[in-house]
Amino acid sequence: NIIIDVNYQALRDHCGIKAVIFDKDNTLTAPYENSIHPRAIFGLQSALDTFGTENVAILSNSAGTDDDPGFVDGKEIEEALGIAVIKHGEKKPGGLDETMRHFPDVDDPSQLCMVGDRLLTDIVFGNLHGMLTVHILPLCTGKENINDNTIAKYIRKVENKIMYADWWGGRKIRSYTLDHKVWKGEYDCPLALADENDPLLGFLEKKD
């Protein structure tokens, strides 16, 4: 799944989420590009329609960090995508303080949802601080992914295999996953949009 498949309405209405944080590379844009990828347009718009511009932002390990002198890339991305890039000194899984300051209406990290394609940065960042996390597939593959960092591509394959493979190590690591304060599982709050073969979303009603 990619960001268009995320159930943003259910995040808001059933999971206690007040704001969404996106990774940039291979989540919203092609690697090291500063314009939105065509396959991410409708997903980003869905998040904006659900949460509002002030409650959607990017937390990247490139743009907005010390690797982005003068916030040049950050400004370009903000202009192109129409959402804020959070400035942070420590790369994910660091950056919680700057993230919390960016969302004044968020009282607790459990009210944030982190969406990204990297387990050891995006998902670990969210899970360490009690956020709801959504791990998606990389936006680009094959020739389209040629600009992706070689080390990052290798690590992504390794971390996915370690975490998701059916072996004792993966099962052991997954057993340490902490429960979210609100989200109780896929039945109560599907994190992916339902389709004709999975009509669960149709039975969810908006909470008062």
Image: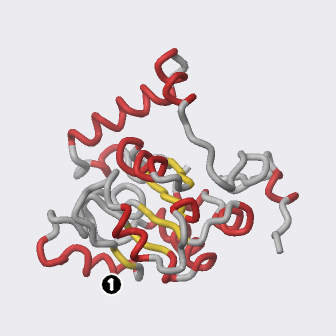
* Residue 133, x across and y down, in percent: 53, 52
* Residue 151, x across and y down, in percent: 21, 39
User: Is residue 68 rendered to the left or right of residue 148?
Assistant: left
Closer to the camera, 179 or 20?
Answer: 179
* Residue 50, x across and y down, in percent: 63, 76
Q: What's the amino acid at mark 1?
A: Glu
User: Is residue 152 rendered to the left or right of residue 128?
Assistant: left
User: Residue reaching furthest front?
Assistant: 107
User: Is residue 109 rendered to the left or right of residue 69?
Assistant: right
* Picture layout, residue 70 above or below residue 177: below
User: Residue reaching furthest left?
Assistant: 69
Closer to the camera, 30 or 192?
Answer: 192
User: Residue reaching furthest top?
Assistant: 168
* Picture layout, residue 24 above or below residue 155: below
**Badge 1: few (under 14), some or many (20 or more) residues near its Cα, within 10 Å?**
few
* Picture layout, residue 93 above or below residue 100: above
Closer to the camera, 124 or 147?
Answer: 124
Identify the residue at image location x=19%, y=76%. 71
Name the quarter where the C terminus is drawn. Answer: bottom right
Closer to the camera, 16 or 204?
Answer: 16
Q: Residue 92's quadrant in the figure? A: bottom left
Identify the residue at image location x=41%, y=42%. 119
* Residue 164, x across and y down, in percent: 51, 29
Identify the residue at image location x=71%, y=63%. 10
User: Is residue 144 rendered to the left or right of residue 5?
Assistant: left
Callout 1: helix, strand or loop? helix
Specify the color scheme: secondary structure
Q: Residue 177's quadrant in the figure? A: top right
Which residue carries the number 1 mark?
Answer: 79
Identify the residue at image location x=44%, y=67%. 38
